[in-house]
Amino acid sequence: MAAARQGQYNQVTVLFTDFVNFTGISEKLTAHEVVSEIDHCFKGFDEIIETHGLEKIKTIGDAYLAVCGLPNESADHAVKAVRCLPDIIKFMIAIWQPVLLSQHDRRFHSAGHKLRGKHRQLS
């Protein structure tokens, strides 16, 4: 991580991420699982932003803050920041898709089971 010099930076784009319902999700996990999941996500974010020329500033809980145009000025700072977003989204989908599909399958199976049960009762 390069050190920023004190002064004014006129051409900077800030990237901020925050996980939706983090508190609700973390209540269902152990402390170790929470830290492990966040660490995995943030390491992935680190690789993505570095590839796109952004600089990580800090993480606080489930929030991730990065910038482009600081400490090294960049005329296309906003473009670089926007171009990293699809990669972050793809990364998160890859992590969550198995979980979401699993939940969908359970709901579908449960709903199907209930429907079959009602069908048997109506027959």
Image (cartoon, rainbow, N blue to C red):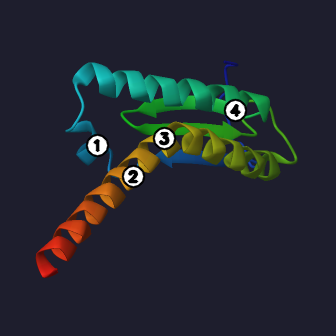
Mark 3 / mark 4, whichever is N-terminal: 4
Q: Which residue is mark 1?
A: 25
Q: Which residue is mark 4?
A: 48
Q: Is residue 101 left or right of residue 50?
A: left
Q: Answer yes or no: do the residues labelled 1 and 2 have beta carbons within 8 Å?
A: no
Q: Is residue 8 left or right of residue 98?
A: right
* Helix, strand or loop at mark 3: helix
Quarter holding the N terminus is: top right
Q: Which residue is mark 3?
A: 98
Residue 105: numbered disc: 2
Of labels 4 and 1, the one closer to you: 1
Which residue sits at x=60%, y=32%?
A: 45
Which residue sits at x=39%, y=21%?
A: 36
Of labels 1 and 3, the one closer to you: 3
Question: Can residue 5 be spotted in the picture?
Answer: no
Kind of residue indicated by mark 3: Pro
Kind of residue indicated by mark 4: Ile
Cα distance in 3D space between marks 4 and 2: 31 Å
Of labels 3 and 2, the one closer to you: 2
Residues 100 and 78: in front is 100
Cα distance in 3D space between marks 1 and 3: 16 Å
Q: Is residue 18 left or right of residue 2?
A: left
Mark 3 / mark 2, whichever is N-terminal: 3
Of labels 3 and 4, the one closer to you: 3
